[in-house]
Image (cartoon, helix red, strand yellow):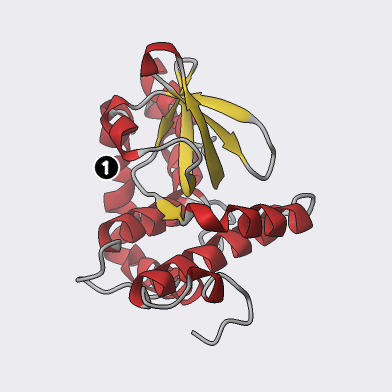
Amino acid sequence: MIEAMQQKLEPVIREFTTGEYYPEVYRAKQEFFERAGTVHDDDAEFEQRMNLFMDWYLFDRDLPGVDLPPIRYFVRQNQASFSPEDKQIFEDLSHSIHSLFLLCRSTFFKKHLVIQDLFSRKKYIVLDPRLKQAFSRGDIFEGRIFPHVGKWNFAQGFCFHPVEMRSFIVGEIKKIRFQDRSRHLKLILQLAQMKLKHQRYAHIDVKHIYEFNSKF
């Protein structure tokens, strides 16, 4: 995520994770990790999972009694005081895309990454020089992207899935592609839980982990 966006998010995070909202973020954390798998401080993906949780809490999960996620509620409360720059950044933040993506290729001179949303099948060109070394062509991963100034940028949280499970993942996506967003999210979180189990049971064939009737 670009620095300007991260800076604008800081007051949103403070407001909706402390004070009167502390019990709510606690409940949200329980809800998220029950669905995506519980992580521990010493898990390799602990930081990434916490980033994914915070993004889900801020951008996707409606606050009780408000029916808006924190980012949109913050905009409603404060938009009268926004500068034109603030207004544009918060507009962009309110239109993130959380999905399962396929890394198709790098652009010429490897300045950008071309990714495909596996649900919508749309392709996006993403600019984030800090992360290029972390990606390989053919990667399938959970992530979130934001539009800004005509370009797309990654959020901070990722969950990379084993490339050998591509056929399984794509097959499951095809089954629910035209269903509503809540069904897409359910699959995304189920796969995240499978990835966590795969890390903990590394001695087990991944094909026995990435299945819905797994014994693990």
Amino acid carrying label 1: it is Glu
Q: Residues within 10 Å of mark 1 (few under 14, many from 20)?
A: few
Residue at 61%, 64% (x, y): give it.
186
**Residue 122 seen:** yes
Where on the picture, by quarter, is residue 198? bottom left
Give the image location of residue 47, x and y in percent. Answer: 26, 58
Where on the picture, by quarter, is residue 39? bottom left
Instruction: Judge by depth and name the residue closer to the eye, 121 or 2.
Output: 121
Give the image location of residue 54, x and y in percent. Answer: 37, 55
Q: Is residue 67 left or right of residue 172?
A: left
Residue at 47%, 56% (x, y): give it.
161
Q: Is residue 112 above or below residue 200?
A: above
Give the image location of residue 106, x and y in percent. Answer: 45, 23
Check the picture and name the quadrant holding the N terminus: top left
Q: Secondary structure at mark 1?
A: helix
Residue at 37%, 77% (x, y): give it.
203
Instruction: Judge by depth and name the residue closer to the eye, 183 or 95.
Output: 183
Give the image location of residue 16, x and y in percent. Answer: 35, 56
Q: Is residue 112 left or right of residue 18?
A: right
Outermost residue to the top: 108
Instruction: Judge by depth and name the residue closer to the eye, 59 or 21.
Output: 59
Instruction: Judge by depth and name the residue closer to the eye, 175 or 178.
Output: 175
**Residue 98 seen:** no
Where on the picture, by quarter, is residue 46? bottom left
Q: Which residue is mark 1?
A: 10
Outermost residue to the bottom: 215
Q: Is residue 187 above or below residue 87?
A: below
